Image (spheres, rainbow, N blue to C red):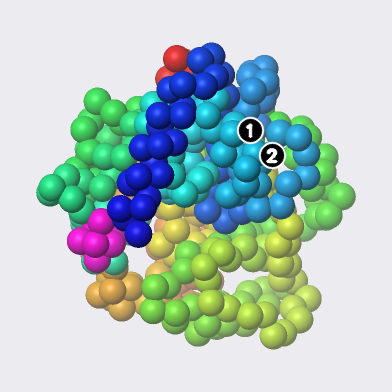
Amino acid sequence: MEVIKYILTNLYSLLYKLVFKNKTLIILGNPYGNVTGHIKCCYYLLKSENLKEVFIVKERVTNKNELRKVSFRTFILLLKAKSIIYTHNPTDIFPFIPKGVKKINIWHGMPIKPIGYNSKIEQIWIKNKIKNKLSPYLKNDLLIVNSFYWVNFFSDSWRFPKNRILPLGSLVSAYLNKYHDEIISELSKRFSNKRNHIIFAPTFRNDGSDYEYINKTLQFFSKLTQYDFIVKLHPNTNFTFNENYVNIIFPNNIDLFDLFLISDLLITDYSSIFYEYLNVKPNCILFQTDKKEYEKINGKLNPVNESLKIYYAQNIIELNDNILLLMAELDKKKQQDFVKFDVDKFIKNIDL
């Protein structure tokens, strides 16, 4: 299989050199098929900067600027691409990428859990992928991160050169700031502005033990009827909703980042979205009831940047206390300071 992929990639690369001398396109894609998360934010930011030849890959195509994964149209247009942007791997866009295309990884959050060579889970993948003792992460030409704090982290975790890591600020907060009024206007049709909204967005567990954690948490939330809880689970989460809750909402067709703007508090566990959220709102709780078990499977958690003000809860009692504390101080809390995303520098690096 690897031999076939090697041959196809080289043939594709030769074709890439021979046709469409004027490379103009930028193509984006993520592994979950829809326009969500960091890819959605990136796409709309680029469109707002009048970059017209920007396409996005997804499973179901709805307009002319969208490409279906593994399609003949994607194959052809990739021959005109100067850059591809993704959150995980170049194969988010197509099974093989021609040499010469600039590969830009905007990742999918600044992580709290170990990744790369420091992750027990990813070490298995690395062992199967590694060749000539070179890091498999070197397939990325450029990595975009939120701040200088993450340069050393990714360089160490990925064994990746620092001069290929670009700290630009939060792409998510830049998108939310740019489209703030439109997003609020749309969400106001679905959510009451007379209620406080709390987002619950945990990550998935590699051992499939999501059910107990999520179920107990939702049962607790259902008792706090003074708030509305918005539940957004990771696409890989193993959980099925079997009950109807009066104050718990499951808006599967709304992007998580858009929901930041109408929320007062985020509750997550080991998900990297806490960092993106703190760029937008000041209140976040890391609810980690199974930390020892989680670290046993994934490896030791990364320390959170000491400059961030964040709250922790290891059980329901601590979670309840923190919710009551933070919700009582909503009007007193100041937004934490972060570097704004440098859109101009981003475009310069993808549009060379």
Residue depicted at 53% across the width and 77% down the height = 238
Residue 99 painted magenta? no
First along the sequence among labels 2 and 1? 1
Q: Which mark is residue 66?
A: 2
Q: Which residue is mark 1?
A: 55
Q: Are marks 2 and 1 in contact (CB under 8 Å)?
A: yes
Report the amino acid beneath label 1.
Answer: Phe
Residue lying farthest right? 189
Q: What SS does tag 1 mark?
A: strand
Q: Nearer the viewer, residue 287 or 165?
A: 165
Residue depicted at 37% across the width and 50% down the height = 5
* Residue 244 visible to an observer of this rendering: yes
Q: Position of residue 59 (x, y in %)?
A: 65, 53
Residue depicted at 52% across the width and 82% down the height = 211
Q: What SS does tag 2 mark?
A: strand
Query: Is most of the magenta stretch helix, strand or loop?
Result: helix
Residue depicted at 31% across the width and 78% down the height = 293
Q: Position of residue 121 (x, y in %)?
A: 29, 66
Q: Which mark is residue 321?
A: none
Spatial CA distance of label 2 from label 1 is 6 Å
* Residue 153 visible to an observer of this rendering: no
Q: Residues within 10 Å of mark 2 (few under 14, many from 20)?
A: many
Relative height, residue 332 to residue 162 (above, below): below
In the displayed structure image, the side of residue 309 where residue 306 appears, left or right = left
Residues shaded magenta: 122-129
Relative height, residue 263 to residue 336 (above, below): below
* Quadrant of residue 269 within the rendered picture: bottom left
Quarter in which the N terminus is drawn:
bottom left
Report the amino acid beneath label 2.
Answer: Glu
